[in-house]
């Protein structure tokens, strides 16, 4: 049976990246949730998809107290983990190598996320995801035991040198396997049956995102290891 993960907790059914969303996923008995991490100026990892709380007001330039005042709905990573410790957590660390001023450094973000996971006793329940593969390299250096998943999208594939750290000419599954990652999270509309089969032969788990339409789920669920969706109750078995 394919594992179902609530994208940003299940943003089609509850507010994204919130305790409410994670508790909803818990009530559905999903395999896990996907969430997005930003880092405050005082090195508190918080859960928010965008690097800013309002246009041009970047989380990395604010203290946690300031973030809380401006956006009290944004939880910390630690609060999220505590809300649903039985779930598996697909934690996307958000950085922008083409706009580094929007976030803290990859190393600072990895260290802060690791500290939160260690203090919560959740290292074994977490997978770290990133479009910026520098994050995954840093995670390998700091905590090689933590599972890593390479995110890909058409835009990052077209700028491989920026997002992957080098212009890898190999097919996508081979490029991911070269990183020694645990898995690959491709954009659902671009990944093919042949690519998933190749990824499996290379020892990779495959987690397409964001699978919302029933036709896409019917195509991918039988061959993927996990499905990341905004509508988890639609596909819960």
Image: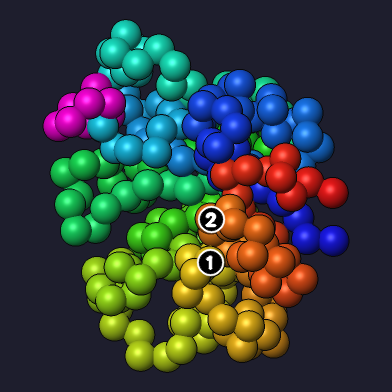
Residue ID for mark 2: 210
Looking at this view, name the residue that lies furthest to the top: 69
Tag 2: Cα neighbours inside 10 Å, few (<14), some, or many (≥20)? Answer: many
Q: Nearer the viewer, residue 109 or 4?
A: 4
Residue under label 1: 188
Query: In the rendered structure, does residue 17 fall within the stretch colored magenta?
Result: no
Provide the secondary structure element on which disc 1 rests: loop
- The reply to whether discs 1 and 2 touch (Cβ–Cβ < 8 Å) is yes
Q: In this view, does 5 lie to the left or right of 129?
A: right
Seen at 28% across and 26% down, the residue is 53
Quadrant (top left/top right/bottom left/bottom right) for the N terminus = bottom right
Q: Is residue 61 magenta?
A: yes
Q: Where is residue 224 shown, x and y percent of the image? A: 70, 69
Q: Above or below — where is 117 with respect to 202?
A: above
Q: How is the image coloured?
A: rainbow
- Toward the viewer: 187 or 200? 187
Q: Is residue 78 visible to us here?
A: no
Above or below 49: residue 156: below
Image-quadrant location for residue 159: bottom left
Using a 10 Å C-alpha cutoff, classify the residue at mark 1 as few (fewer than 14 neighbours), some (14 to 19) or many (20 or more): many
Residue drawn 50% across the image and 32% down it: 16
């Amino acid at each position: 049976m394919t594992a179902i993960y609530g994208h940003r907790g299940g943003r089609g059914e509850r507010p994204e990246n919130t305790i409410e969303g994670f508790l909803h996923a818990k009530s559905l008995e999903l395999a896990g949730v996907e969430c997005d991490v930003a880092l405050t100026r005082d090195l508190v990892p918080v859960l928010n998809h965008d690097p800013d709380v309002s246009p041009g007001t970047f989380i990395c330039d604010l203290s946690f107290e300031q973030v809380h005042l401006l956006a009290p709905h944004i939880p910390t990573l630690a609060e999220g983990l505590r809300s649903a410790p039985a779930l598996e957590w697909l934690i996307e660390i958000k950085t922008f190598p083409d706009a580094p001023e929007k976030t803290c450094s990859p190393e600072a973000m990895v260290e802060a996320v690791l500290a939160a996971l260690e203090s919560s006793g959740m290292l074994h329940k977490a997978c770290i995801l990133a479009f910026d593969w520098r994050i995954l390299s840093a995670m390998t250096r700091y905590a090689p035991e933590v599972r890593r998943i390479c995110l890909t999208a058409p835009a990052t594939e077209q700028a491989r040198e920026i997002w992957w750290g080098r212009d890898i000419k190999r097919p996508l599954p081979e490029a991911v396997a070269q990183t020694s990652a645990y898995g690959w999270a491709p954009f659902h509309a671009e990944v093919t049956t042949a690519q998933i089969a190749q990824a499996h032969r290379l020892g990779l788990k495959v987690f397409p995102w964001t699978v919302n339409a029933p036709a896409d789920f019917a195509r991918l669920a039988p061959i993927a290891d996990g499905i990341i969706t905004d509508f988890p109750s639609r596909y819960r078995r």
